[in-house]
Every structure is written in structure tokens, then in C-alpha cells.
Image: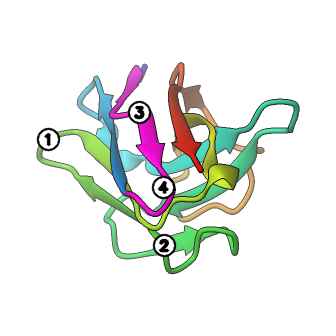
């Protein structure tokens, strides 16, 4: 069992930066690939970025490539998402997710655990 708790969301101006964190409970955090998804008002949930269990491999959606960076600290059981050059289209609830197969994933089909989300609002 893994519990995920996101933090770091809030209101930021366009062009600004935010770092999200996801604290994971349980001793098996290092076995999971992790990812960030987001859901904007009136839209479907979409994949933002994922990272393998070791942190060696990452994947980014085209919409965030070059602006967002996913990372993890396995010693702290924590996942991060550094978001730079934010624009209003990045406004969404951001969710942390865990996939026990351990490798980078590009869809949400195999997600085993979800966090409850943290809201990021980017003002123009």
C-alpha cells in the first residue's frame, strides 16, 4: 500500500515557477515508477511527466517539455515537479501517481495509486 500526498500548489503569475512535491508513505517507494498528471477545468486528466524507479529515465508531454522537470529523492520518499515559465494553460489540479512496474510509463492505464491532487493556478 502506498499513500501519496501532494503539496506546493497555489497561485502564481504567468512566467513564474512552482515546485510541487509528493510525499509517499510505505517502504516500497523505490520500487515504483512515479508520475505527474493534471486535470484542467472541463478537460480530461492528462499525463505531464513520469520517472522510473531509479530516476534514470524520464518522459515528458510535449506541452511541458523544456519547462518542467520531474525528479525523485528515494531516500526521502518524495517526488518533485519543478515547473518553470508557467502560462495560464498550465492551470490545473496536479496529481501524483505510482506504477508498480517501475519503468517510465506514457499512459495512466497501469497506475496503482493516486494522490488527491494540488491546485496550481496561473494568472495572466
**Few, some or many residues within 10 Å of mark 4 (<14, 14–19, 20+):** some
Image mark for residue 67: 2
Crowd tier of the residue under label 3, counting other residues whose Cα lies within 10 Å: few below 14, some 14–19, many 20 or above: some
- As drawn, which residue projects farthest toward the front? 124
**What is the spatial separation of the Cα atoms under label 3 and label 1, in whole angstroms?**
20 Å
- Badge 4 or badge 3: first in the primary sequence: 3
**Residue drawn at x 46%, y 49% as measured from the top left:** 13
Q: Which residue is mark 1?
A: 76
Q: Quadrant of residue 12?
A: top left
Marks 4 and 3 sit apart, C-alpha to C-alpha, by: 26 Å
Kind of element beneath mark 4: loop
Give how far apart the Cα atoms at labels 2 and 4 are.
Answer: 24 Å
Mark nearer the viewer, 1 or 2: 2
Q: Mark 3 falls on what kind of element?
A: loop
How far across and down, in percent of the image, does residue 116 sit? Answer: 53, 19
Q: Earlier in the sequence, mark 2 or mark 4?
A: 2
Mark-to-mark CA distance, 1 and 4: 18 Å
Quarter containing the N terminus:
top left
Q: Which mark is residue 84?
A: none
- Horizontal and vertical percent for residue 71? 32, 61
Residue beneath the point at 35% across and 75% down: 56
Q: Earlier in the sequence, mark 3 or mark 2?
A: 3
Label number found at residue 102: 4
Residue 9's disc number: 3
- Which dot, 3 or 1, sits closer to the camera? 3
Please say if the residues under marks 2 and 4 sit with CB atoms less than 8 Å apart.
Answer: no
Q: Secondary structure at mark 1?
A: loop
Callout 1 environment at 10 Å: few (<14), some (14 to 19), or many (20+)? few
Tell me the residue at 87%/31% (across/down): 42
User: Residue sitting at 41 percent across and 65 percent down?
Assistant: 84
Circle 1/circle 2 CB separation < 8 Å: no
Find the magenta span and give its range.
Answer: 2-16
Amino acid at each position: 500500500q502506498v499513500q501519496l500526498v501532494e503539496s506546493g500548489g497555489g497561485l502564481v503569475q504567468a512566467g513564474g515557477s512552482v515546485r510541487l512535491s509528493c510525499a509517499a508513505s510505505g517502504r516500497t517507494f523505490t520500487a515504483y515508477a512515479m508520475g505527474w498528471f493534471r486535470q484542467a477545468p472541463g478537460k480530461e486528466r492528462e499525463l505531464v511527466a513520469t520517472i522510473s524507479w531509479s530516476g534514470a529515465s524520464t518522459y515528458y508531454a510535449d506541452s511541458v517539455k523544456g519547462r518542467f522537470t520531474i525528479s525523485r529523492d528515494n531516500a526521502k520518499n518524495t517526488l518533485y515537479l519543478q515547473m518553470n515559465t508557467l502560462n495560464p494553460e498550465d492551470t490545473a489540479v496536479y496529481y501524483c501517481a505510482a506504477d508498480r512496474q517501475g519503468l517510465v510509463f506514457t499512459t495512466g492505464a497501469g497506475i496503482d495509486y493516486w494522490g488527491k491532487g494540488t491546485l496550481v493556478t496561473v494568472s495572466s
